Amino acid sequence: MYYGVKNYGAQPVYRGIVRVSISDLCQQFLYSSSEPSEELDPFYYADVSADIFVSTSTADAADDRKDLVYFDLAHPEQGLHALILSDGVSYGFGNQIWGNHIVWTDTRPPAYNIIGYDLAAEQFFDVINDEPHQFGAKIWDGRVVYTDLRNGDGNYQTNCEHADIYLYEIATETTTRITDGDWIQWYPDIWEDTIVWADYRDSTEPNNMNDFSGVEIYSYDLVSEEETKVTDLPGRGKMFPRVFGNRIFFEMKDSENQIQIYMVELD
Ligand SMILES: [Ca+2]
Ligand SMILES: [Ca+2]
């Protein structure tokens, strides 16, 4: 069972929040794909939707906790709210918010799962809760996509072989498998009916997560059920695609082997 929202009170937390600028949010976004840095204390894995800012935070430093917190920019007097699970933990990574729904990767042993919280219903919910590991959830209007290792050995600590993309629709509580290739397909994002991900099918070792030789960005349309190869630049591995409208953004190394952000516009 889950319970409750903890309120930290307004003053100390409010000062923390107001110093979060757009550049800070960009920094948080960039760090969201790697391990958290204590130097980013007290907020990391940040996301924002309308007036709600969500982040993992160490603001409650008194007992050295990391909590998933949210802050309503329209009601700063309420301070920071922490979402505390029944075992007193809410730490995870990859926090995402759309409307009333917050989703994140729950790293409590024995396996990674995707958990959500409904701000309107004031309830936690499971996107997926089972033995194999899942991570990297993204959300658009009640639709959650994530990477699932159930078709490999299920373990995030090994090589993520056979990773696939799954879709969970909150309203209907239905789960749909989006990819079924016998190779790594992971780090999805979703916008309306379009799902994008990084796909290893053209890599020399397509089930080696470190073989970026043929990693390209693919998309899938939930209405037409058609898959599209979005990029075709062999030897320049791509990662962490995001979709916004008909624009797809992703990381790719430039000719000097430095990671840059690129964009493709779909027709
Ligand atoms: Ca799991
Ligand atoms: Ca796959």
Image: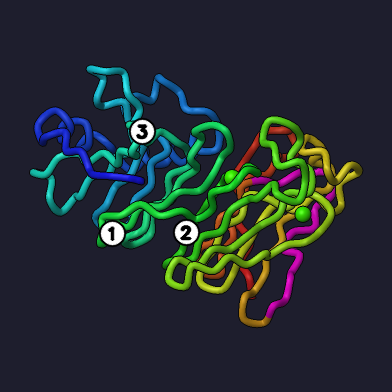
- Note whether ligand 1 is within 8 Å of mark 2: no
Per the image, the residue denoted by label 3 is 87
**Residue at image coords 40%, 33%:** 91
The residues bearing labels 1 and 3 have C-alpha atoms spaced at a distance of: 30 Å
First along the sequence among labels 1 and 3: 1
Residue 218 image position (x, y, % from top left): 71, 61
In the rendered view, does 93 fall on the left or right side of 58? Answer: right
Q: Nearer the viewer, mark 2 or mark 1?
A: 2
Q: Please give the label number shown on residue 50.
A: 1
Q: Given the image, on which type of amino acid does mark 3 rest?
A: Asp
Q: Of the residues shown, which amino acid type is indicated by label 2? A: Ile
Closest to the observer, 41 or 183: 183
Secondary structure mostly seen in the magenta stretch: loop
Looking at the rendered structure, the secondary structure element under dot 3 is loop
Residue marked by disc 2: 139
Residue drawn at (20%, 50%) of the image: 72
Q: Is residue 88 magenta?
A: no
Of labels 3 and 2, earlier in sequence is 3
Q: Position of residue 130 (x, y in %)?
A: 59, 47
How busy is the neighbourhood of tag 1: few (under 14 within 10 Å), some, or many (20 plus)? few
Q: Secondary structure at mark 2?
A: strand
Question: Percent from the top left, x then y, of residue 102?
Answer: 38, 52
The mark nearer the N terminus, 2 or 1, is: 1
Q: Quadrant of residue 156?
A: top right
Q: Is residue 225 left or right of residue 172?
A: right
> Left of 43 or right of it: where is 29?
right
Residue pictured at 35% horizontal, 52% vertical = 124
Instruction: Tell me the quadrant of ligand 1.
Output: top right
Q: What range is drawn magenta here?
A: 225-239
> Toward which corner of the image does residue 231 lie, by quadrant?
bottom right
